[in-house]
Amino acid sequence: MWKDAIEELEHRRRIAQMGGGAAAIERRHIAGKMTARERIEYLLDEGTFVEVQEYVTSRIDDFGMAQRRVPGDGVVTGYGRIAGRLVFVSSEDFTVIGGTLGEYHAQKIAHIQDMALAALAPIIFLNDSGGARIEEGVSSLAGYSSIFLRNTKASGVIPQIAVVLGPCCGGACYSPALCDFIFMVEDISSMFITGPGVVKAMVNEDITKEELGGARLHAGKSGVAHFAYPDERSCLDGVCALLSYLPEHCRQPYESACFFKQSLHPDSYEFADLCDIVPDNNRKPYDVKLVIENLVDCDSFFEVHKDFAMNAVVGFARISGNVVGIVANQPLVYSGSLDCDASDKMARFIRFCDCYDIPLITLIDVPAFYPGKEQESRGIIRHGAKLLYAYSEATVPKISLILRKAYGGAYIAMNSKKMGADIVYAWPIAEIAVIGAEGAVEIIFKKKIRSAENPEQLQQELKKQYEERFMNPYLAAERGYVDEVIRPDETRGKLIAALGMLSGKQEKQPWKKHGNIPL
C-alpha cells in the first residue's frame, strides 16, 4: 500500500514539475529562455523553495481543454529565501497553455498573495503569460480582478516586485503596474494593452512588439519599467540587489531594515574633492551622480528609473551602513529643471520611501519648472503638484542639501524648509532666489536699463549688485530657511550626524481616511 501510494505521489509530482512537457521545455532552452522553475531556483537561496498548491488543476473541459490540463495550471507558487530573508514567489509557466491565466491559475496567485501579506514578507511576480485564457471566459477576467485587489491591499504594507520575463499583455499588465517596481529584459519582455495585430487592425499601424512595449521603450520613454537588463540572469540578480535595500514590511523598525551593513568604517573611504566635481559657474553642467557617489558608502548607490526622465536621479544608497533614499536634480539634462516626467519619477520614489520609513536625502540644483507649451499642455501644474504633495505628506526624516541653484517654484518643490524638510544645508556657492540674477535684473530694472547711456554696462553692474545682495545662501540662513551653510568636504559627516539625530523622528498626522493626491 505504502509503496503504491508513494509511487503515485512521485508520478504526479513528475508530471507537475514537467509543466508543458519535455518538448516545450526544450523549445524554451533553444530560445535562450529559462523555465518557470529554473527562474525560481536561480532567484532563491539553494534548497529553500517550498512549493504551494502544486497539484491545482483547471476544471474546464470545453474547447479540448481536458487534454491540455496540467497540474499546477501554468503557474508555480511558493516561498523561500533570498540572502536568508523570507520571500514569496509566483512564476508563470509559458509551457502550459502559453502561461495563460484561468480561474485556478489566478486562484493560486491570489493565495500566495494572501500568504505573503499574512506573513508580512515581500512578494515577487515572475510574469510570462499570453494573457487571459479565452477558453475560460469571465472566470479568467474575475481572476485578474482578485489579483489586482490584493496588489492594492498589499501596497505600502509589503514590497511587491514584478519581473516581466516574456509577454505580459492586456489586463495582465495591471498587476505589474500596481507593484512597487517593474523589471524587464531587453528583447524578451513585452508589455502592452493591445498587441501589434490588434493595433494593425484598429488603427492600421505597423509596429513590432519591441517598439510597442519592449524593455527599452518602457524603461526609457514611458517610465512603466524601473529597470531593464540584457538577460534573465542579470535581471534576477538585480531583483536580489534591490531587495537588499528594502525592509520585509512597513512595520519593521528602521534599524533592522538596514541590511548588509558596510563593515568598513565610513571615515576610511577615500572620496574625491566635491569642489572639483561641481563648478562654481552655475551655467556649467556636471554629473550629480558623481556627487552622490562621493557622499554615500562606497559602491552603494542603486539607481532606480535610470533611463527615464534623466533630468532627475533617484535611488537607494547607504550612509554609514544605513539605507537612505536619494532624490537629486541632474544638471546634465535640461540643466536639472523639473518637467512632467521628472516630477512623477521623484514623487513615486518619495512615496515608496515614506511607506517603508526610509529617510530621504535631497540634492538640489534646480533652475525652474521646465517652461514651454509642451509641458503646460501635458499638465506640468498637475504633475508638479504630485512632487509637492509627496514631500509634504512624507513623515520620514527629510534632509535637503542645496548644491548650487535653487530658484522659484522648483526650489519650493524640492523639499524646501517650509515644505517640511527637517534639515536644510547649503554650500557657500548656493543661490536661492525667485529667479536667476539676469532675469531678475531685466524685470526689476527694465526701464532704467533701456534709458541708460550704456544699457549693457548698467545691466552687468546691476546684475553684479543683485548677485552680491541676494544670490547667496546667507540671506536664507538669516531667515531660518537654511539651517547651516557648510563646506563640501563637511557634507558626509553632517549627513551622518543628521540621520542619527532624526532616527527617532515621530510625526503625527491629523486623522483622515486618506488625502487626494493630484493624480
Image (tube, rainbow, N blue to C red):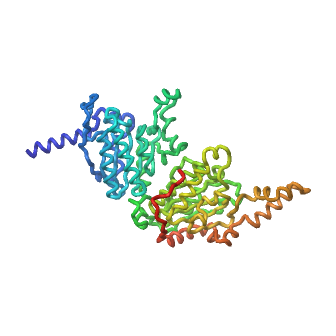
Residue 472 location, quadrant: bottom right
Residue 25 visible in this rendered orientation of the protein: no
Q: Is residue 119 left or right of residue 186?
A: left
Residue 290 visible in this rendered orientation of the protein: yes
Residue 140 coordinates in the image, percent (x, y): 34, 38
Q: Is residue 340 left or right of residue 38?
A: right
Residue 295 coordinates in the image, percent (x, y): 56, 63
- Asked if 418 appears above or below 110 in the picture, the reply is below
Residue 146 coordinates in the image, percent (x, y): 35, 46
- Residue extending farthest left: 1
Residue nearest the viewer, comparing 44 with 174:
174
Residue 359 coordinates in the image, percent (x, y): 50, 64
Residue nearest the viewer, comparing 513 with 323:
513
Residue nearest the viewer, comparing 227 with 143:
143
Residue 492 location, quadrant: bottom right
**Residue at the spot 60% in from the left edge and 69% down from the top edge:** 490
Q: Is residue 483 left or right of residue 239?
A: right
Q: How many marks?
A: 0
- Residue extending farthest right: 453
Residue 447 location, quadrant: bottom right
Q: Is residue 304 left or right of residue 401?
A: left
- Quarter placement of the N terminus: top left
